[in-house]
Structures are given as structure tokens and as C-alpha cells.
């Protein structure tokens, strides 16, 4: 394509989302950097613009339909119609089932499932009109079950079914949908998990790395690189897949 592609990355103030926004900008895309707190997106946006790219910060709670519609409209007005969407915003509210509150359950479902649904519904018309689109949803190895994450595991498994159905419905419009399922990635999210279970982040990383075949934990850039492939022009025949990026095989 000769015109600059427009991408939206949610939860892009930090972690995997920030690395993905920067990587897509480096590949030449204009990027809508979306996160709960618009001011928190400033670092990602300035890293992109200082490197010569184009990006805007947009504050949005992806679980709120009116905010999602307004955020996508801002991207359309300021950058153009988005044809790449990375549903990355996420939270954890871990607890064993017997201690898990309804609020813990609902807030995880709201951000991951409702948020991805609302964002995708708002963006898809720009993709179908362009006869080109790339959707990537962030799943997790936790989709296969993980102690203390009955809410998160259900949401991340749900996103896999969501992804496959998007692939089936939108394929004829030139739109692909895939899920990336990371293992342990070194971000604020895993840092908070270490705090919750009462170990230092360094020990948590060292212990986790011992269980991973490539003998290290992942970095946000590992996930960004996989997403960059999935949203590329040449990945047009890869759709409805779940790519585990976990430093080793998954069952
Ligand atoms: P992170 O560092 O916690 O970043 C997540 C970002 O999403 C934060 O900036 C957060 O904002 C934002 N966010 C949360 N709720 C939102 C909402 N309702 N609307 C808009 N933005 C919202 O997490 P990460 O580790 O980079 O994870 C990114 C994605 O990868 C998540 O979907 C996560 O589940 C998935 N993942 C991560 C790992 C891992 O090991 N790190 C593994 C598998 C999957 P606030 O800071 O304001 O809350």
C-alpha cells in the first residue's frame, strides 16, 4: 500500500502495548496509542515522534462503549481510518475461586472480552471499507488453565474463540484475525504478580526462567515482533490462529 496504514494499540502506555506501538510505528504505521489515562501515553507517543514516526495519545476505558466510539473517531479524525487493531489492554484480579469476588470476575471480563468486542466492533467498518484489515488479540498461556486465575484464564480462552469467529466473519473483506498468547513477559503486570505472592521480581524472573526451554523470560519486544508479522501485508493467509510466544511449546 502506498498510503500510511493507521494502527490502534490499546493498553499502549506501557509494557507489551507500548513496545507494539513503537514497533508498528518503526514499520511505518501511524499509531493511535490508547490507554485508560491519556497522560500516561505521553512517553510512548514521544518515543515514536522523536524517532520520526506519527502517533497520538487517546484516553479510553475500552470497556465503555461511548468512550470506545469517541476514541476511534479521534483516531479517524487525526490519523485516518484504522486498518490495524491490537486488543492488548488487560488487567489481572487473581485469587483462588473460593476467595474471588464478583467484582474480580466482572472487571477482568469487562476489560478483556467486552473491551476487545467493543473496540473491534468500532474499528471493523474502516477495515471492511478498505478491504484490508489486521486484528490481533492478546490471549495468554493462562488460557490453558492457571491456578488463581479462573477469571483471567476464562477471558483469555474466550478471546481465542472470539478471534477464530472474527477470522471466519471478516475474511472475505481482506481482514485477518489472530491471537498472540504470551507466556511470562517482564512487565508491570508480572511485577505486580510477584508482589502479590510475596517474592522479589528478580527471584520470580529467575525461577520462571528455569521452567522455560529458552532459559529466559520474555520481553515486550518479543511479543511486538510477533504482532508485527501478523499485521504485515504478507501475513494475509494466516488467520484464526493462536500463536503461543512462550519460549517453548505449549500443550
Ligand atoms: P501492563 O503492563 O499491565 O499494561 C496493560 C495496560 O493496559 C496498562 O497501561 C493499563 O492501564 C491498560 N488498561 C487496563 N485496563 C484498561 C482499560 N479498561 N482500558 C484501556 N486500557 C486499560 O500489562 P502487559 O503485561 O503489558 O500485558 C498486555 C497484555 O498482554 C494484556 O492483555 C495481558 O493480559 C497480556 N499478557 C501479558 C503477559 C505477561 O506476562 N505480562 C502474559 C500473557 C498475556 P493502567 O495502568 O491505567 O491500568
Image: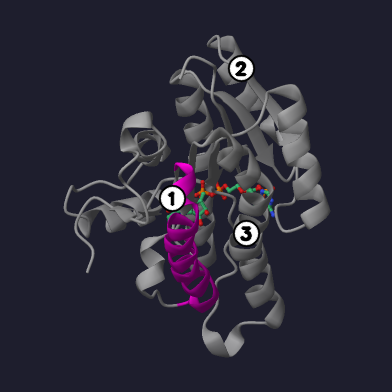
Q: Where is residue 22 shown, x and y percent of the image?
A: 50, 26
Task: Work out which quarter of the rendered image holds the C terminus and state it.
Answer: bottom left
**Of marks 1 and 3, which one's residue comes earlier in the chain?**
3
What's the CA distance linking mark 1 and mark 3?
17 Å
Graded by Cα atoms within 10 Å as few (under 14), some (14 to 19) or many (20 or more), the crowding at tag 3 reads some
| Image position of 75 (left or right of 94) | right
Question: In the rendered image, is residue 105 in sight?
Answer: yes
- What's the magenta region? 148-174
User: Which mark lies nearer to you, 2 or 1?
Assistant: 1
The answer to whether marks 1 and 3 mark residues whose Cβ atoms lie closer than 8 Å is: no
Q: Is residue 155 magenta?
A: yes
**Of marks 2 and 1, which one's residue comes earlier in the chain?**
2
Q: Secondary structure at mark 1?
A: helix
| Residue drawn at 45 percent across, 49 percent down | 172
Question: Which residue in the protein does label 1 denote?
Answer: 171
Magenta span: helix, strand or loop, mainly? Answer: helix
Amino acid at each position: 500500500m502506498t498510503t500510511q496504514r493507521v494502527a490502534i494499540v490499546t493498553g499502549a502506555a506501557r509494557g507489551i502495548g507500548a513496545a507494539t506501538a513503537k514497533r508498528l510505528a518503526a514499520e511505518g504505521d501511524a499509531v493511535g496509542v490508547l490507554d485508560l489515562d491519556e497522560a500516561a501515553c505521553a512517553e510512548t507517543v514521544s518515543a515514536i515522534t522523536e524517532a520520526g514516526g506519527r502517533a497520538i495519545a487517546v484516553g479510553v476505558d475500552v470497556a465503555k462503549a461511548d468512550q470506545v466510539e469517541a476514541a476511534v473517531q479521534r483516531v479517524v479524525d487525526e490519523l485516518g481510518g484504522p486498518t490495524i487493531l491490537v486488543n492488548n489492554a488487560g488487567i489481572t484480579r487473581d485469587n483462588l475461586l473460593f476467595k474471588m469476588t464478583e467484582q474480580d470476575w466482572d472487571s477482568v471480563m469487562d476489560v478483556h472480552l467486552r473491551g476487545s468486542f467493543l473496540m473491534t466492533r468500532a474499528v471493523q467498518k474502516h477495515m471492511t471499507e478498505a478491504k484490508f484489515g489486521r486484528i490481533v488479540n492478546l490471549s495468554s498461556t493462562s488460557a490453558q488453565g492457571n491456578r488463581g486465575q479462573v477469571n483471567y484464564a476464562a477471558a483469555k480462552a474466550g478471546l481465542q474463540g472470539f478471534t477464530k469467529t472474527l477470522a471466519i466473519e471478516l475474511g472475505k473483506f481482506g481482514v485477518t484475525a489472530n491471537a498472540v498468547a504470551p507466556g511470562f513477559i517482564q512487565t508491570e503486570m508480572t511485577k505486580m504478580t510477584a508482589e502479590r505472592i510475596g517474592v522479589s521480581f528478580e527471584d520470580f524472573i529467575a525461577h520462571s526462567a528455569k521452567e522455560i526451554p529458552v532459559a529466559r523470560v520474555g520481553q515486550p519486544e518479543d511479543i511486538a515482533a510477533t504482532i508485527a508479522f501478523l499485521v504485515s501485508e504478507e501475513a494475509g493467509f494466516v488467520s484464526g490462529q493462536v500463536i503461543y510466544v512462550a519460549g517453548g511449546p505449549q500443550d
